[in-house]
Image (cartoon, rainbow, N blue to C red):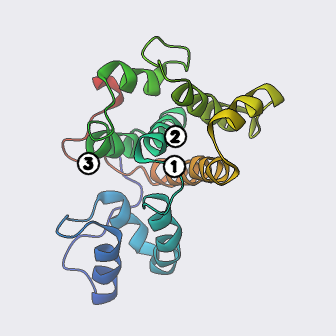
């Protein structure tokens, strides 16, 4: 049961403008964003950082980004945001069904991960989730695959999606129509 109901149209002009800024052109606003605009100053403040995290300005590519986001959301039990990202990006970044399953409930050592960089990103995400830190061995492997700039982007991306997961879970945002559920993989 949803705890904080998303706003429904017609929207106040300021709300409509914020929702338009949060979505790609021509795409109706998702439930999470319609929930966030219940606190318009917060939604506005989030715009800059959220826009950066999903932009080409981020120093890691879309596939790396989606590994971190999907794993973070799955580890946080945030079916809502996980489903949104799987629906919109999994095919675009070339995830196989086995990789989607692994990101949801598997391990970096699963056979579907043949690229060491992918495995390192999953391990970093898990370490940050479990311990809020990386051990020295993992850090040495990170150094072989990520620049300082990329490592910082990965750390903050994982943290950002923890925050998004907390908000979506706490508000109990209803899944988007047609978005996959954890039980689907």
Q: Nearer the viewer, mark 3 or mark 2?
A: 2
Q: Residue at x 41, y 47 (%)?
A: 62
CB-based contact (under 8 Å), mark 1 and mark 3: no
Q: Quadrant of residue 3?
A: bottom left
Relative to 56, 95 lies left or right = left
Q: In front: 15, or 136?
A: 136
Disc number placed over residue 176 in the picture, else none: 3
Q: Earlier in the sequence, mark 1 or mark 3?
A: 1
Q: Nearer the viewer, mark 1 or mark 3?
A: 1
CB-based contact (under 8 Å), mark 1 and mark 2: yes
Q: In front: 154, or 37?
A: 154
Disc number placed over residue 60 in the picture, else none: 1
Residue 142 screen position, x and y as percent: 68, 35
Where does the C terminus fall, quadrant-wise? top left
Check disc 2 and report the residue beneath it: 68
What is the C-alpha distance between the residues marked 1 and 2? 10 Å
Q: Earlier in the sequence, mark 3 or mark 2?
A: 2
Q: Identify the element where label 1 is drawn.
A: loop
Residue 168 screen position, x and y as percent: 45, 52
């Amino acid at each position: 049961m949803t705890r904080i109901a998303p706003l429904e149209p017609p929207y106040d002009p300021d709300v409509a403008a914020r929702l338009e800024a949060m979505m790609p052109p021509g795409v109706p606003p998702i439930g999470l964003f319609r929930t966030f605009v219940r606190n318009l100053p917060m939604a506005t403040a989030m715009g800059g950082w959220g826009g950066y995290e999903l932009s080409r300005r981020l120093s890691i590519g879309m596939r790396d980004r989606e590994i971190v986001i999907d794993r973070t959301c799955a580890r946080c039990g945030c079916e809502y945001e996980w489903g949104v990202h799987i629906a919109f990006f999994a095919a675009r970044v070339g995830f196989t069904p086995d990789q989607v399953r692994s990101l949801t409930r598997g391990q970096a050592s699963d056979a579907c991960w043949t690229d060491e960089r992918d495995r390192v990103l999953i391990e970093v995400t898990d370490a940050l989730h479990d311990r809020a830190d990386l051990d020295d061995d993992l850090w040495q492997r990170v150094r072989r695959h990520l620049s300082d700039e990329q490592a910082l982007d990965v750390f903050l991306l994982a943290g950002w999606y923890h925050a998004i997961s907390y908000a979506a879970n706490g508000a109990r945002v209803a899944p988007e129509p047609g978005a996959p559920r954890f039980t689907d993989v």
